Amino acid sequence: MGELLSLDFMRQALLAALLVGVAAPMVGVFLVQRQLSLIGDGMGHVALAGVAVGLLTSTSPVITALIAAVLAAVAIEWIRARGRTSGDVALAVMFYGGIALGVVLISKSPSGTPANLNGYLFGAILTTSSTDLMVFAALAAVVLVVTAVLRSRLFAVAHDEEYARAVGLPVTALNVTLAVLTAVTVVVSMRVIGLLLISALMILPNATAQLLGRSFAAQVRIAVLVGVLSAVGGVVTSYFAATPSGGTIVLFAIAAFVLAALAHGLLRRIDARAHAAAERHDHEHGPGCGHEAIVHDDHVDYLHDGHRHAPHQGHYDEHADHESASHEHTH
């Protein structure tokens, strides 16, 4: 690791990966809640057109990509708010038109080469300049501050938009804010992971967190941890393995999700077996049965062989701990 930190371009690459690893899951958690998991891909397509304009006019591709992505974000929310049945078609035209325009314009730019295009589509973190890094850091700071300040409101809208509207929250403004945050995150991430892969780092850490976290706050923390480990681990691995950074980062995020899914499935099997064992015994629990009685909400559990059993309609449910608030049945 000391060898990597001694290289200027790797220090910049690792810092950029850290920024993306934190920012992408913080925005993605709300997209997952709203079932808009692939919206980042669409914004990435439009951002490519902005990159092409920057290359063609010899201006900063980051700034022109940001402008294009933000305009796309506002357009997406305007189309969603109108609720037209043709909304999906309009979004498809905008997304595919963006990537098509980007490819055509990049081919006409003075620096238009396949390698240049691939760098924006799939990431080229080792070519990130110090100027790019400063812009990315500023944009990432905006994302983190806004999501931290508006987290409860964004969650309320993402969880139940009609209820949020009924209690007086500015739903439209919050939706536009989330869309703009997504656009900013896409631009922050494009040199690290690529415009075609950025949705993966927004969504996969949150999908992993949903399997492991028991509350929204815990899920956010887990998602950020997975995002950072995937981004930094992917960059380090891509350096030694000479692989594209974007694809390597996504493979790390997929590996984390697969491991979490396997662990989640194993724990569910263990719980199911314990529950089945709790149901299968001939002893009749009740007052004076010889087992410790523990009051649990509106009923009584009995401690039996290290398990807490609650009589329920001719069988026993197992309650793992006193904090459990409901019966869980596997039958």
Image: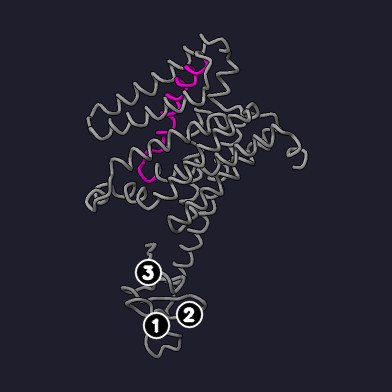
Task: Give yes or no for residue 213 being in the magenta stretch.
Answer: no
Task: Give yes or no for residue 42 being in the magenta stretch.
Answer: yes
- Identify the image quadrant of residue 252: top right
Of residue 234 and residue 43, the one placed in the foreground of this image is 43
Is mark 1 in CB contact (under 8 Å) with mark 2?
yes
Q: Which residue is mark 2?
A: 304
Color theme of the render: one colour
Of residue 12 and residue 312, the one placed in the foreground of this image is 12
Q: Residues within 10 Å of mark 1 (few under 14, many from 20)?
A: some
- Identify the image quadrant of residue 313: bottom left
Q: Earlier in the sequence, mark 1 or mark 2?
A: 1
Residue 285 marker: 1
Tell me which amino acid carries mark 2.
His
Q: Is residue 48 above or below residue 182?
A: above
* Residue segment shown in magenta: 33-55
Q: Is residue 170 above or below residue 88?
A: below
Task: Report how far apart the C-alphas of labels 2 and 3 lie in the structure.
Answer: 20 Å
Q: Earlier in the sequence, mark 2 or mark 3?
A: 2
Tell me which amino acid carries mark 3.
Ala
